[in-house]
Image: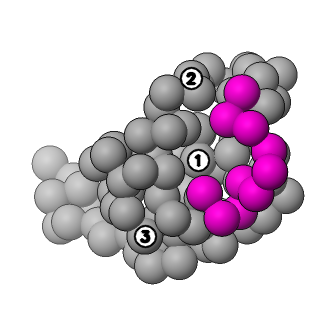
Amino acid sequence: MVPLDWVVMLAWNKECGNNLRLLRGKKSRREIADALLSQQVECSQEYIRKLENGEAASVSTKIITAIAKTLGVELIEIMTELRVEVTKTICTSS
């Protein structure tokens, strides 16, 4: 298994966006963005909108884990199909 802190970006899709929108509930995007900023994670309301609408192709682990923490959910609840694949080129030494 690969530790999440080794991963910089995760693939994103519309299903993840729908999950995020549902989990956000009545919290505004502004509230989420402000909560992330208090965790020293910069993320705009506009980027949260793009995530929810499935317009982003990927998301940084720093942002999505901060969003999960803010919503009080586990990352797997947002990204239900989360899998990490490692290629041989990453695993081999020169």
**Could you tell me how many numbered marks the image carries?**
3
Residue at the image position 45 percent from the left and 79 percent from the top: 81
**Which residue is more in the foreground, 69 or 53?**
53
The amino acid type found where label 2 is placed reads: Ser
Sequence-first disc among 3 and 1: 3
- Is 2 covered by the magenta stretch? no
Stretch in magenta: 21-30
- Horizontal side, residue 39 vs residue 1: left or right: right
Residue at the image position 20 percent from the left and 66 percent from the top: 87
**How crowded is the residue under tag 3: few (<14 C-alpha within 10 Å), some, or many (20+)?**
some
Q: CA distance from mark 2 to mark 3?
A: 21 Å
Q: Is residue 1 visible?
A: no
The amino acid type found where label 1 is placed reads: Ile
Q: Badge 1 is on which residue?
A: 64
Residue at the image position 78 percent from the left and 64 percent from the top: 73
Sequence-first disc among 2 and 3: 3
Q: Badge 3 is on which residue?
A: 15
Judged from the image, the secondary structure of the residue bearing numbered disc 2 is loop
Q: CA distance from mark 3 to mark 1?
A: 14 Å
Name the mark on residue 44: 2
